[in-house]
Image: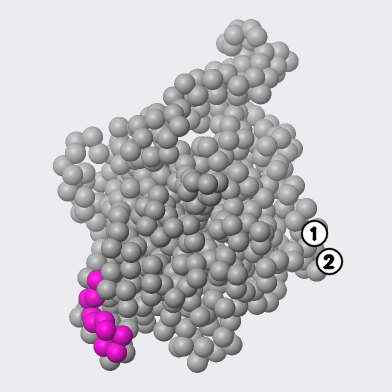
Amino acid sequence: MPIFSNHVRLSSSLLQRLKRHVTAGVHRSFTTTEGNRPTIVHKRSLDILHDPWFNKGTAFSMTERDRLDLRGLLPPNVMSPNLQIERFMVDLKRLQVQARDGPSDPNALAKWRILNRLHDRNETMYYKVLIANIEEYAPVVYTPTVGLVCQNYSGLFRRPRGMYFSAEDRGEMMSMVYNWPAEQVDMIVVTDGSRVLGLGDLGVHGIGIAIGKLDLYVAAAGINPQRVLPVMIDVGTNNGKLLKDPLYLGLQQHRLDGDDYVAVVDEFMEAVFTRWPNVIVQFEDFQSKWAFKLLQRYRNTYRMFNDDVQGTAGVAIAGLLGAVRAQGRPMIDFPKQKIVVAGAGSAGIGVLNAARKTMARMLGNNEIAYESAKSQFWVVDAKGLITEGRENIDPDALPFARNLKEMDRQGLREGASLVEVVKQVKPDVLLGLSAVGGLFSKEVLEALKDSTSTRPAIFAMSNPTKNAECTPEVAFSILGDNIIFASGSPFRDVDLGNGRIGHCNQGNNMYLFPGIGLGTLLSGSRVISDGMLQAAAERLAAYMSDDEVIQGIIFPSISRIRDITQEVAAAVIKEAVEEDLAEGHNGMDARELRKLSQVN
């Protein structure tokens, strides 16, 4: 794979092929077959109207109403899909207010309810509304509102969506997968609900995050919604409130652990890949304890990835490289950046590992470079700075533990506070993945004023909004306009007066995971390699123009998500071909893909 450049060249023919795939969802009714070919519907009358996959409501023509025994079951006026959407939007707009307060905004949950009802009755219209208004409604169906949805899922549950595999189903999963009606599934998002966003153990309620992620696969990547499957693996919960709640929908027992836990996940993986050998499984919101272990257990055998570990890392890498560009320096200078990371969970460690590998590749891609790269990171968790003096240190964090003698020379010690570390290190980047709202306090940000960087970067990446390490208003008010700011959840840009704007970049995983999934699907790669993930991050890093980056804009607008997804997918396919992992898809074999990727 080539080392970074500001403009990654991708095959024009490959991009055209992806554009046809990604845009198909806007112009056709989704069917159970590939492409836009019609399907035979073995339903009539009310069964059609009660099936969100096929229901078009008042948009059924009179010919269709006669053919499908619908005449008399709908009001006589035939409405166009556009008029249906206009009517729906009038109702939805009544609830909207000019606020972006995430979970603290009750209107966000009200909007989610209305969108969800539409999803329940007319799936095609639901996705048309979402695609046409993606910047506005992505925060409703996904983060930050999905966190509030998960917290209240038992009360919001109206009809089942997805599948539930529980500890009580051991020995039955191989037959259970055949209860799902779709003959082919392309994408599964699975969670065990043990660490939903930054909200902790929400048990079976965590399926809300899987549903939201798959909505974005459809809206951003054009994946057929009849070929996606949200999954909850319910092994119990350690949430005391849920264990006592009579309305809780999941198993009211403490979580399985150890070999018993692994056996349940093993059985699930074997079952879904037996029925759907080409499916891609995205692991979502598994607690750190299991996220890395399960990733290493399955990644060389199945087509799977962990979005919290690998997706978050890719978006962070793209942002970090963008921050280097915003300083007026080439991306190849990334190994010179001093980075303080707050948070050592699965997301934090995932970013650290990816950033270290990226630096090592730029320094020569050898053992010496890999060892040297770790000296650019200072990791702070709930107990303070992680050093080799830490007792019972997490094995995943051990490679980034600082040497005690070296820290003594820097005026630091084991367990030093975040403020102390920022004061002594004077970092170029302050990266938050702690899930602790407000962690970047006034004192911490004041300390960052002494950064050796001409334009320090602040990444407050924790979700949902209330868990963001700081807000852009606070950061810009303390540090002025000469900073780069990015967050995981959406915030408004900050008006700094005199025509100056403090840009708030949303560094959300949605920029990458739809493209990673789509690229893997269309390439037919049997695994998702580090190189494919790196190619995705590189493409996102190079997506913004030089002029945009100099203004402090390092991530694009969500309104461009379909174009971004297309570009990322093309980069993933190209890398899969170069690594000889691609086996082709839907009649296009690896040789044809290779020809596409070589067209100038």
| Magenta residue check for 410 | yes
- 334 up-or-down from 259: above or below: below
As shown in the figure, which amino acid type bears the numbered disc 2? Asn
Name the residue: 70% across, 34% down: 28
- Measured in 3D between alpha carbons, the distance from the residue under mark 2 to the one under mark 1, in whole angstroms, is 7 Å
- Left or right, 43 with reference to 23: left
For numbered disc 1, what is the local secondary structure?
Answer: helix
Residue 328 screen position, x and y as percent: 60, 70
User: Which mark sits nearer the N-terminus, 2 or 1?
Assistant: 1
- 268 up-or-down from 491: above or below: below
Kindly tell me whether residue 587 is visible in this rendering: yes
**In-front residue for pair 525/428:** 428
Residue 177 screen position, x and y as percent: 47, 48
Q: Which residue is mark 2?
A: 600
Residue 92 screen position, x and y as percent: 49, 24
> Do callouts 2 and 1 mark residues in contact (Cβ within 8 Å)?
yes
Q: Which residue is mark 1?
A: 12
